[in-house]
Image: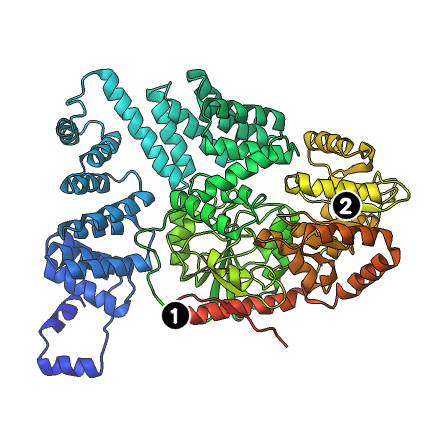
């Protein structure tokens, strides 16, 4: 059969013409590719090339045949053909390091050193210990006369081949050229260089979210140089990202033992204390970091955030204005999600997000998806999240996953967290035919997987929140990438195409402040689970710690959303509404103590603030809400899932519409449940309406009755209606990309 294949090369021109009009693709032996490789390895390039071509006639997307055809084209000096073939192979199998390494060789042969270096880095992100790629990277830097970068590359190479004389000679020569110190002057210098190389490799691995490998690299650096301060700090940060808080604290403690004036050591240790709910210790450590380094942005923001969790407003206005002004002045380093709680400007939020993402998640030079049009029977939608577990997002979105039209859509879960065994975690897993745990994969690996799966629409359910993996999307693994639900603002990056919203959330005049194109859903952007259970038993007021009589204002928001201006209004309401109380969540002892002291300063008895402990499960919390009379929303960051909980349980929510996405969510929900009369537009009207509802029982009773009727008839809790709207949005996005059109804002028409 092999002879017959090659014999066809000498067919007459008439036979070739006949083939073109009536092609006949002959059968290939099962080991055709191995035979082609054998020819290739023996230097029998014409035979190898002919067989590669025959393989590709049978299977045009055979990744290895495409790859080695490209290698062969490179070997025969046909560089443009080589680039085209290897790129085709990468499009089919983007997770293979050698393809990027060989593509780099082609670019280097063409003198395109920037593209070569980019390809080598992609190869190393998949296989950091590749000797050949690391060597070629060093030579590319030398060709660019970037001696410092070449030195670091050969240092890494020596870690992989410590006894390689040729690499050591190259490094020594470059050190002389760069006047860094010639040959190794002492054993200590050699050991320091090795430790630095391990440390920098750890940083590279950490940036790619290859956390276990990063830990090993940092440990190797510390085995060489025990007092390597930066290695202790960054090893601690990796442990923190893996939620190994005790191990992280030990690392930061070692750093402080090495240098007692190390501001990052105090800051990072403060974060561990915050995560462990030791908020007083966290504040103390952040303050120490700032005393050592007054311009330390991370410490400033984390201190303010922790103070908000404690309802410590001693420096509230000063800190808020400092952060706002820094962001407007172009300062980098502020985390976008904590900024939302004090922001009153979408423009500020975009500036903060763009600066943060530019530093942390810059777009890839060469995107994984480069314009291909997938031809699937169904639109492939991947939901990417760390929150497929006991988390508000999971409770809100579970039914949507279950109700998706699986004849039209193929939905895939990409879980950034290990599989959660809780009932909600298992419910979400069971809603998908494909549920993929990528918690141990690096950002590029996850992106390559999304590209390999030929996902049409990748939905990021986290945005720039804690433990999100925006770096995955920076590689552009899917034609359409969407910001939805988990992050109530703009991501500030060009590689996220759309944000799902509604006209309450993003007025037309705000579009310019969103990096994404805005897609308006008809009723509300907010998804709900219409099957959520409310416990049958409602506790008595006494069982909930409430007085038997009197009006009950409540707010079950996180305490960091409460601020002095809002609390002052609440205290005035307690002063004007006789026998009323304010029912709040019991988050931490520091917040409780501070809020009670604040009440005293406003002339309100502290016992009129009542704190609700966490219930056994969500159903019990939904049931006890019936004991409250009116939910008072927060501003500038509204209640989101908490508003949904209250309305589902029959509790009216009074909100004040803010200027940002996060400050307009409750208004969206109230509109969708037919209660726009509970939306105010300034805090004076908010206070006046709260007082009126608290002192006009018949009016509040009418609203409660209306909510009870509307809950089952209005769109807010109609999950199937929402499902049809979001699927229409996905379809319209997909159609645009299939037509080759750029993303554009649009509105989804409501279903009949």
Q: Residue at x 68, y 64 (%)?
A: 672
Instruction: Give residue 676's quadrant in the image.
Output: bottom right
In the rendered image, residue 18, in percent from the top left (x then y), is placed at 16, 83
Q: Mark 2 highlights which residue?
A: 554
In the rendered image, residue 585, in percent from the top left (x then y), is placed at 73, 40
| Disc 1 crowd, CA 10 A, few/some/many (<14, 14-19, 20+) | few
Q: Which mark is residue 15?
A: none
Residue 468 seen anywhere in this rendered image of the structure = yes
**692 left or right of 161 in image:** right
- Residue located farthest toward the right when viewing the structure as drawn: 548
N-term mark: 2 or 1: 2
Asked if 454 appears above or below 139 in the picture, the reply is: below
Residue 581 seen anywhere in this rendered image of the structure = no
Q: Mark 1 highlights which residue?
A: 741
| Disc 2 crowd, CA 10 A, few/some/many (<14, 14-19, 20+) | many
> Where is the C terminus found, in terms of image quarters?
bottom right
Q: Secondary structure at mark 1?
A: loop
- Using the numbered discs, state the Cα–Cα distance from disc 2 to disc 1 in whole angstroms: 49 Å
């Amino acid at each position: 059969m092999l002879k017959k294949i090659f014999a066809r090369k000498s067919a007459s021109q008439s036979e070739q013409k006949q083939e073109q009009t009536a092609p006949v693709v002959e059968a290939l032996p099962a080991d055709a590719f191995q035979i082609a490789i054998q020819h290739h390895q023996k230097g029998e390039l014409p035979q190898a090339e002919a067989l590669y071509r025959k393989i590709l006639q049978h299977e045009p997307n055979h990744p290895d045949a495409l790859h080695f055809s490209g290698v062969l084209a490179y070997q025969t000096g046909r560089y443009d053909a080589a680039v085209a073939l290897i790129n085709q192979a990468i499009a089919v199998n983007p997770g293979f390091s050698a393809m990027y390494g060989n593509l780099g060789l082609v670019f280097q042969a063409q003198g395109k050193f920037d593209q070569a270096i980019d390809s080598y880095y992609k190869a190393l992100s998949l296989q950091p210990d590749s000797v050949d790629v690391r060597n070629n990277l060093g030579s590319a830097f030398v060709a660019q006369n970037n001696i410092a970068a070449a030195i670091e590359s050969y240092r890494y190479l020596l870690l992989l081949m410590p006894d390689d004389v040729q690499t050591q000679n190259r490094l020594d020569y470059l050190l002389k050229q760069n006047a860094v110190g010639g040959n190794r002057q002492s054993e200590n210098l050699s050991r320091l260089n090795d430790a630095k190389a391990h440390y920098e490799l750890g940083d590279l691995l950490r940036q790619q979210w290859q956390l276990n490998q990063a830990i090993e690299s940092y440990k190797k650096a510390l085995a060489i140089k025990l007092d390597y301060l930066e290695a202790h700090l960054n090893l601690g940060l990796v442990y923190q990202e893996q939620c190994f808080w005790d191990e992280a604290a030990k690392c930061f403690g070692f750093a402080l033992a090495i240098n007692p004036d190390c501001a990052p050591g105090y800051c990072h240790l403060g974060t561990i204390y915050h995560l462990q709910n030791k908020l007083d210790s966290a504040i103390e450590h952040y303050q120490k970091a700032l005393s050592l380094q007054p311009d330390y942005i991370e410490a400033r923001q984390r201190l303010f955030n922790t103070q908000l969790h404690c309802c410590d407003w001693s420096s509230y206005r000063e800190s808020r204005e400092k952060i706002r002004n820094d962001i407007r002045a172009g300062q980098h380093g502020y985390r976008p999600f904590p900024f939302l709680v004090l922001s009153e400007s979408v423009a500020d939020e975009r500036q903060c997000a763009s600066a943060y993402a530019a530093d942390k998640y810059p777009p890839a030079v060469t995107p994984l998806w480069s314009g291909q049009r997938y031809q699937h029977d169904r639109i492939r939608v991947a939901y990417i999240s760390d929150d497929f577990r006991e988390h508000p997002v999971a409770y809100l979105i579970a039914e949507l996953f279950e109700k998706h039209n699986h004849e039209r859509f193929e939905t895939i879960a990409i879980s950034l967290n290990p599989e959660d065994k809780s009932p909600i975690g298992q419910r979400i897993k069971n809603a998908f035919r494909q549920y993929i745990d990528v918690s141990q994969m690096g950002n590029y690996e996850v992106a390559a997987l999304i590209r390999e799966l030929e996902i049409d629409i990748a939905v990021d359910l986290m945005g720039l929140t804690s433990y999100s993996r925006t770096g995955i999307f920076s590689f552009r693994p899917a034609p359409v990438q969407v910001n939805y639900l988990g992050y109530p603002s703009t991501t500030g990056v060009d590689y996220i195409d759309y944000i799902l919203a509604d006209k309450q959330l993003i007025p037309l005049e705000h579009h310019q402040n969103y990096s994404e194109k805005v897609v308006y859903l008809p009723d509300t952007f907010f998804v709900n689970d219409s099957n959520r259970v409310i416990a049958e038993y409602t506790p008595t007021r006494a069982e909930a710690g409430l007085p038997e009589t009197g009006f009950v204002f409540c707010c079950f928001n996180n305490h960091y959303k409460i601020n002095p201006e809002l609390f002052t209004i609440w205290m005035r309401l307690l002063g004007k509404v006789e026998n009323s109380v304010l029912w709040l969540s019991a988050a931490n002892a520091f917040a409780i103590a501070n809020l009670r002291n604040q009440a005293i300063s406003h002339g309100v008895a502290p016992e009129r603030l009542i704190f609700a402990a966490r219930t056994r499960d969500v159903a019990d919390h939904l049931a006890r809400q019936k004991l409250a009379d009116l939910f008072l929303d927060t501003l500038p960051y509204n209640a989101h899932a908490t508003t949904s909980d209250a309305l589902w349980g029959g509790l009216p929510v009074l909100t004040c519409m803010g200027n940002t996405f996060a400050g307009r969510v409750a208004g969206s929900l109230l509109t969708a449940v037919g209660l726009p009369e509970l939306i105010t537009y300034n805090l004076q009207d908010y206070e006046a309406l709260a007082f009126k509802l608290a002192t006009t029982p018949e009016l509040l009773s009418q609203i409660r009755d209306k909510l009870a009727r509307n809950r089952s008839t209005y769109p807010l809790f109609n999950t199937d209606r929402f499902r049809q709207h979001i699927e229409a949005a996905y379809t319209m996005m997909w159609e645009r990309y299939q037509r080759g059109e750029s993303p554009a804002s649009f509105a989804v028409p409501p279903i009949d």
